[in-house]
Image: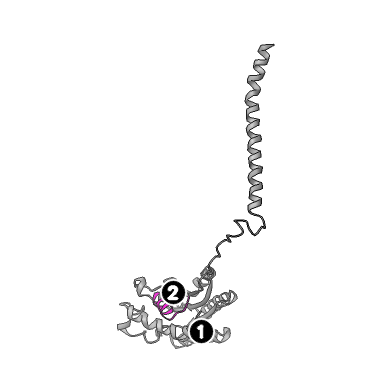
Amino acid sequence: MPLINRNFKSIFRPLLLVLAICVLFAACQRSDHKSNQIQGGSNGDSASSSTPAPAKPEETPAIVVFGDSLTAGYGLPPEQNYQTLLQQKLKENGYPYRVINAGVSGDTSAGGVRRIDWALEENVKYLILELGANDALRGQPVAEMKKNLAQIIERAQSRGATVILAGMEAPPNMGEEYTREFREAYRDLAKQYQVTFIPFILDGIGGKPDLNQADGIHPNAEGEKVMTENVWRVLEPMLAKP
């Protein structure tokens, strides 16, 4: 009989000890929970209610420059491209906007349609749309380019972004009819969607060796300054200072 009692004690003593620890832990948890309820209640004297969570700062509105290599700043360091120069002008004139460069070298209007949605994920107030030059260089149908640009404009406007359409000129070797249709496509879109229009973003740059890189197509550092001015003349009157 004593053997049985010793075995009983040896078996259940650890269990009793575990049970006691569990009861003690539960009691502590209830005590902590009650204390938290008191501190986090609606009482105006509580510590938690007197320290509100910091407010999340409002995101700075964005201007997205959306286009091909002309927008991307092909062949130039970032500090010389038009996106950086535009950001400097905004800062110097007290406009609280950040410029996002969504230029992709070699992109066409079809490529722009595929990526416009992610470009509009930020708090975009203005979209400066510059596409179509590569369509012309590849001899793409003008009607197809026009349809693609229309889709980009529609998606931007549906997100509440104001669109500025930057026009281009087709190379003369495409023929007079193609060149005329290409130019008119931009004008028609600007009128149809009532968007602000820059007839030719390379105005004052095209055909001038001193403002272009060796390829004769992409602006050099001085040419980027002229292109920035072409955009700024149209953009600045639309902006609101805080």
Using the image, determine if residue 150 lies above or below residue 5: below
Q: Is residue 17 left or right of residue 163?
A: right
Report the residue that reaches farthest toward the right.
Answer: 1
Amino acid on which disc 2 is placed: Asp
Local secondary structure at mark 2: loop
Q: Bounds of the magenta span?
A: 82-96
Tell which of 238 and 47 is nearer to you: 47
Q: Position of residue 35 (x, y in %)?
A: 64, 48
| Alpha carbon distance from label 2 to label 1 | 24 Å
Q: Position of residue 64 (x, y in %)?
A: 48, 74
Amino acid on which disc 1 is placed: Met
First in sequence: mark 2 or mark 1?
Answer: 2
**Residue 89 within the segment the image draws in magenta:** yes
Q: Position of residue 27 (x, y in %)?
A: 66, 39
Can you tell which quarter of the image residue 200 is in?
bottom left
Using the image, determine if residue 121 lies above or below residue 200: above
Q: Is residue 169 visible?
A: no
Report the residue that reaches farthest toward the front.
Answer: 45
Marker disc for residue 68: 2
On-image quarter of the N terminus: top right
Report the residue marked by disc 1.
238
Using the image, determine if residue 123 lies above or below residue 187: above
Residues tagged 2 and 1 counted as in contact (Cβ below 8 A): no
Local secondary structure at mark 1: helix
Q: Is residue 183 left or right of residue 8?
A: left
Marker disc for residue 219: none
